[in-house]
Amino acid sequence: LTQRRVVVTGLGAISPLGEGAEHNWQQMLRGASGIRLIDRLDVSTMEVRIAGEVVPLPEVEEDGLFPRLGIHSRFALVAGREAWRDAGLLDEPPEPTRAGVYLGAGKGIVEVWRIADALKAAKAGGDFDYPAFLRRAAETMDPSRREQERYYQAGTHLARAVGAQGPCWVCITACAAGNHAIGEAAAAIRHGDADVVLAGGTHSQIDLMSLAGYATLGALSTRNDEPHRASRPFDRKRDGFILGEGSAVLVLEELEHARQRGAHIRAEVVGYGNSADAYRSTDPHPEGVGAELAMRSALRSAGLEPGAIDYINAHGTSTSQNDAMETAAIKRIFGPRGEAPPVSSTKSMVGHLIAAAGALEALACVRALEEGILPPTVNYENPDPACDLDYVPNEPREARTVYAMNNSFGFGGQNIVTILRRYAD
Amino acid sequence: MRKRVVVTGLGAVAPNGLGAEAFWEACLEGRSGIAPIEGFDATGFPVRIAGEVRGFKPVDWVPSRKALKIMGNNIRFGVAASQMAAEHAGLKEEPPDPARYGVVMGSGIVPTDLEEIGDAVLASLDEQGRFSTRRFGETGQKMLFPLWLLKHLPNMVAAHISIIQNAQGPNNTIVTACSAATQAIGEAFRIVQRGDADVVLTGGSDSRVDPLSLVAYSLLGAVSVSDRPPETVSRPFDRDRDGFVLGEGAACLVLESEEHARARGATIHAEVAGYGSAFDAYAVTQPEPEGWGASRAIEAALRDAEVSTEDVDYISAHGTSTLLNDRMETVAVKRVFDRGTRVPPLSSIKSMIGHLIGSAGAMEALVSVLAIRDGRVPPTINLENPDAECDLDYVPNEARELNVRTVVSNSFGFGGQNAVLVIREYNP
């Protein structure tokens, strides 16, 4: 029995840099930034006033399936349909029962003001009056809207949109979710559970509660006066990540299936590692023990020595902790600067798309392998002694690249690493 | 070379019993855990009953008081069930290699703690009583619990379990509504099968007996508003059913590679033999009425297990007690099994605990394992007048002795995700 191989045959994206996989890639090569002052909400009194918003929000034709979709579902439909088209599957759809959707998703938008009325009714007499709350909530709540914010909705909408009747899987491993979906989708194809899978992530979390929540944890940059320069992974003056939003979706396909229909094969998924820090729910492991374990598992699953890796797309969030931890973990496996491959963080341009981040980074890896160009880490100006690798600062770089490693480390300690290979017969 | 995957530990926190054995016994006795809601005052609301977990003391299961503060109920239930399962499997005395020890859990939404956000929202209202984003920034947000966000990240179920068990291997949380836990167990099965871990704690935990969920589900028309005695409201396959009853709780299974379990001399309770999943690609809040997605998922699981329909002795039904599900499931089961042979008996424990959504599939998988171990299957209680279109053997009202070697456990999600496990007697 020969091992089934998994290749990438389609790409789609919508991010703070705009719509379209190719547009996103070209913007990354220009070192463009999608970080701006938040426009969608009045944030004048908030500590954090910048984010990577998708402007304008996409208006999706909904095929009459459901009147109002959550933003995360709209993003996934835009990116997923693009990937499906890019793979040539619109013209020759696969057998529906052999097609699946694997998506990383995250907490939907928390619109607390929607229950303000009910809360007011509940607190009118001092103590919390639950019967009053229930009465008022039943009068004011729109349950279908609430239903649309559910994590899994984007996955089911996308599966319906392309008619995929195979596995429909949604994970929520925070910042690692998009990359996680790609790793598990590849494993599912290899096992024979499906032949074609739309895999990626989608997320929108630019809302007051999330901005307040992350800011209280000290995780967000407050460089409000210089939005473009706020996301600066590995730079000594980094002060936190910037919330972004969007979606990226890849078409993963079993190699023979892709060959038989003459699909354009962009890259191959060859490695996947998954680990947990098992440290604290509030912080990543300071030495990156879990990150190291995931990288080593991915190398082992690909049957590769560290020296084979030509490029690492870092998790690189621009927080003091992550970037130093990630650097240390990479060095323990790959050696110091000179021995370790170049590392860059595309979050420097789009911010942190949380559940979609790893998927957009996988897309950047695929394009880097195809073109032989590494995307830069922008805003890299002040070397940090704790971050002393080659981060491809500020300018893209031509480099023959056969194996790219994609790192994603989640809040809560979940670490996902995938390895992609330039496709050759 | 795919590894065989066995079940070596069980844990449960259920509305009708704390601990896997207490829960199992209650199910065999046909004891319902559905009662008037005690968690908050639901007086006057159309829905006033649920399957709540009672008598549960989180401090018995969570070692760190500090961690307890950032755990919602669903996380507490999940942590407790995983502690029980790890102990039952003997993993406390001989912990597995941390790098080869994983956690995959099904989960649901994390309910908003109203009393916690109430003050913050009220402080953000302007003179007209409308929510003001400006005021939220000025005063409201400062009244939030500082670790608010951490408490509400749904992936925290598996994260907390991994910390307590020092499980550093593959880790995941899946949230595909009513099939989440079955998908989680299926994924854990695959992880061990392909050799990415030796031991995985898997299952589900969920708690939606909270005011907001209660309002939302009742407006969607999915939950029962019956005035019957609470313990008789959940009546899958009965003519007089009128919706499901919300439940809460968690169940956890220890899945382990056969070789790892045997090497350490662990007691093996059953084998996970197959997994299949399929998507309806139909409507948002309804199962496809002909159950094509459901039957494809059952067939995929049987194929994966290399088991024929004749070999199946019992089906742990999804059986939600909604008209649509129960008829659809009956049609789907008949399509798969009724080919000149016999349809095995099926029963729904949701008749006793209600619908635990993100953990439902885990409760049912656990019952499947124990049915194999003890040669008994739990009843569908409250089945007095079968629906004319539900004409199978649902093991009405009384548990039954049955030589159970192979079980099919069904989960069909609200949004159309169908996931099915095949669990069988372990034979070396």
Image: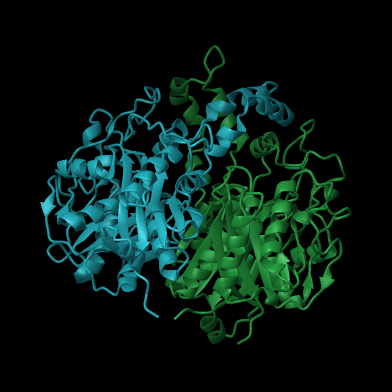
Chain colours: A cyan, B green
Total marks in image: 0
The quarter of the image holding the N terminus of chain A is bottom left
Q: Position of residue B350 (x, y in %)?
A: 74, 55
Q: Is residue A63 above or below residue A341?
A: above
A366 to B146, vertically: above or below: below
Residue at 20% from the left image edge and 58% from the top image edge: A369
Position of B75 with respect to B337 (left or right) is left
In the image: residue A408, left or right of residue B28: left
Q: Nearer the viewer, residue A148 or B203?
A: A148
Q: Toward the viewer: B311 or A388? A: B311
Q: Residue at x 54, y 30 (%)?
A: A112
Q: Residue at x 42, y 65 (%)?
A: A189
Q: Quadrant of the C terminus of chain A?
A: bottom left
Q: Position of residue A11 (x, y in %)?
A: 31, 50
x%, y% of residue A343? 20, 56
Q: Judge left or right: residue A348 versus residue A91.
A: left
Residue A293 visible in this rendered orientation of the protein: no
Which residue is found at the position 26% from the left and 37% from the top?
A17
Q: Quadrant of residue B78?
A: bottom right
